[in-house]
């Protein structure tokens, strides 16, 4: 049986921190779905098409990566595609508390899905999409926080 993981997020934008989680998770799984979820609580900076295009270019030619999007509950998406694992990156203790609660609820909703946490490397701990969006919104240079191959399309 293939080990299939879902790395869900809004990825608005996809950062070096996200890229690092993926690179460290690739040896652990046979397939990783980078799944852009629609979050009703967030107003997107980049369109879904822009995010799909930017992330797609990063992982072009990587057979273990599947890029997708979904609406609804992440745990339902996992069931739909046959994923047994949810992949999450943790930067801070606050992230852990928030993600722990979600993981426990997800497990109650679908015991066949296990959440796997990967701790951020220290240099990416302060990097989050909200801050990067603000830098980009006001015309700042956010390139040091974005993957080297990332191309921002207008």
Image (cartoon, rainbow, N blue to C red):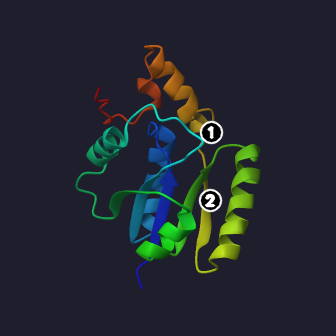
Image height of 150 relative to 143, above or below: below
Determine the residue located farthest toward the left in the rendered image.
61
| Mark 1 lies on residue | 122
Horizontal side of 32 relative to 106 (left or right) equals left
Image height of 133 relative to 68, above or below: above
On the question of residue 83 being in view, the answer is no
Question: Which quadrant holds the C terminus?
Answer: top left
Whole-percent x, y for residue 21 in the image: 50, 51
Question: Is label 1 or label 2 in front?
Answer: 2
* Residue pictured at 24% horizontal, 51% vertical: 60
Secondary structure under badge 2?
Answer: strand
Determine the residue located farthest toward the top in the rendered image.
139
92 or 84: which is nearer to us? 84
Query: How many numbered tags mark residues here?
Result: 2
Whole-percent x, y for residue 101 in the image: 74, 59
Q: Mark 1 Cα within 10 Å, few/some/many (few <14, many 20+)?
A: few
* Residue pictured at 51% horizontal, 42% vertical: 17
* Chain-order first, disc 1 or disc 2: 2
Whole-percent x, y for residue 145 in the image: 47, 30
Secondary structure under badge 1?
Answer: helix
Horizontal side of 104 relative to 5 (left or right) equals right
Q: Determine which quarter of the picture holds residue 100.
A: bottom right
| Mark 2 lies on residue | 117
On the question of residue 17 being in view, the answer is yes
Question: Which quadrant holds the N terminus?
Answer: bottom left
* Residue pictured at 60% horizontal, 42% vertical: 41
Question: How far apart are the two marked residues, 1 and 2, measured between alpha carbons?
Answer: 15 Å
Contact between labelled residues 2 and 1, with CB atoms less than 8 Å apart? no
11 or 122: which is nearer to us? 11
Whole-percent x, y for residue 130 in the image: 57, 31
Horizontal side of 28 relative to 128 (left or right) equals left
Q: Mark 2 Cα within 10 Å, few/some/many (few <14, many 20+)?
A: some
């Amino acid at each position: 049986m293939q080990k299939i993981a879902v790395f869900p997020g809004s990825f608005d934008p996809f950062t070096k921190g996200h890229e690092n989680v993926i690179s460290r998770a690739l040896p652990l799984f046979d397939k990783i779905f980078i799944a852009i979820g629609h979050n009703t609580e967030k107003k997107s900076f980049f369109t879904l098409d822009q995010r799909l295009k930017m992330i797609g270019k990063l992982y072009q030619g990587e057979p273990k990566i599947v890029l997708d999007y979904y609406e609804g509950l992440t745990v339902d998406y996992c069931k739909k595609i046959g994923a047994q694992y949810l992949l999450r990156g943790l930067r801070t203790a606050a992230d852990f508390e928030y993600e722990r609660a979600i993981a426990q609820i997800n497990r109650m909703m679908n015991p066949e899905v296990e959440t796997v946490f990967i701790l951020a490397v220290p240099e990416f701990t302060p990097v989050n999409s909200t801050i990067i969006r603000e830098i980009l919104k006001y015309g700042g240079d956010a390139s040091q926080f974005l993957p080297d191959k990332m191309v921002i399309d207008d």
